[in-house]
Amino acid sequence: MKKCTLLSVISSMVLLGCSSTEPPQSSASTAESNVLSTQPLIPDTEAPARVLLRGEIMIGHESRTIHPCNSNATYWLELPTQVRTAAESMTTKPNQAMYAEVFGCFEPATSGFAQQFGSKFVVTEFNVISTENSNRCQQPPREARAFGNEPSWSADVSEGAIELSQLGKETLHLPVVNLEQNLSESRYSLTQGQLVIRPQMCRDTMSDSIYGWTAQLQVADRSFSGCYNDSSYPSDQVAGTYSQSIDNSTLLTLTLSADHRAESRYSYNDGSQDVVEQGHWQTLNSDLIQVTSVTYQGQQIIAVRDFELKGDTLSTQYETINGATYPLTNDGLNLKKAQ
């Protein structure tokens, strides 16, 4: 299975986010003070499409986990060293729970403490990691925005326009006339200035939170610096239950949950006990869905099926088990989504 590595702002059409301070005169010194590392999170454009998880994380020697919002699942969490160090610096006690919005991909967990979880989530980018407000999972997802302090400002960000809000002032509507993206930044050219987003860790000066991107906004003769927070709305619409009758004797039901758990269940007409495989799923690209089973009837296994998505049907003709690829009989699988 392809290893997931660091992605950058180029990995999606619009990546923004991070909050911090802004000096009316000189923005450079303030911006530097909010950047927690001068080393950017460099992307790998060959990595799988990124998955977004919102949830509660714990970072300790023997427990680095994420518990997605509104889910019973728990995954081992693999963080870039610089992100892990920054997150640990905010905690005041061992295994302190923090809220996080992280992007990355799934891999089987085959060794160490991670093995007991079966699947691990490899973080490539993140929106926010915070020790404040343990009930953030109860709040709805947010659109992309940049923001900062001293003075307080925020900007809703979209491909078409930037909406700048400041205390005591009218909201400014700033149309985007051009968007340029590369591995080191996203640059929005505006009718009255520009917004630049860079993949560097940023600390919000008004809360105990870190963000994954810095933001520099120039409007006429005003300069604002801060952090950027990408949209936390889920992009996958694949979750659901898919099924197929095999040889009129077996019903295969594939359940893809919103928290990225995957269960393949084989039910037999002769009354035999169901056979169950469990693991995770993720999108490789817009029409290719990868389902990885990490347990078979409770025993460890790595079985990978790459399904082609056509409308409401998932199809595949091959399966890779513990590294060896085999053809599936009877023209493979064609699983139909329940309506």
Image (spheres, rainbow, N blue to C red):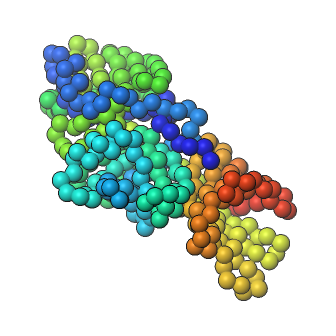
Residue lying at the far right of the rendered structure: 330
Q: Count the marks: how many?
A: 0
- State the image quarter where residue 34 is shown: top left
Residue 12 to residue 257: above or below: above
What residue is at 69 percent from the left and 53 percent from the top? 323
Residue situated furthest front in the rendering = 112
Q: Nearer the viewer, residue 338 or 214?
A: 214
Q: Residue at x 39, y 38 (%)?
A: 230
Left or right: 70 with respect to 110? left
From the viewer's perspective, tell me whether residue 81 is left or right of residue 21: right
Question: In the picture provided, is 98 more to the left or to the right than 104?
Answer: left
Please name whichever residue, 291 or 221, is drawn nearer the observer in this view of the structure. Answer: 291
The picture places residue 273, in percent across and down from the top left corner, at 67, 83
Q: Is residue 7 visible?
A: yes
| 135 vs 198, nearest the viewer | 198
Which quarter of the rendered picture does the C terminus lie within? bottom right
Q: Residue furthest top?
A: 221
Q: Which image quadrant for residue 127?
A: top left
Give residue 89's position: percent from left, percent from top.
23, 45
The answer to whether residue 259 of the structure is visible from this angle is no
Image x and y of residue 190, in percent: 37, 18
Residue 314 to residue 151: above or below: below
Q: Residue at x 15, y 19 (%)?
A: 24
User: Residue at 81% of width from left, 56% of height from top?
Assistant: 327
Q: Residue 193 appears at what percent x and percent y?
A: 32, 16
Relative to 188, say whether 64 is above or below.
below
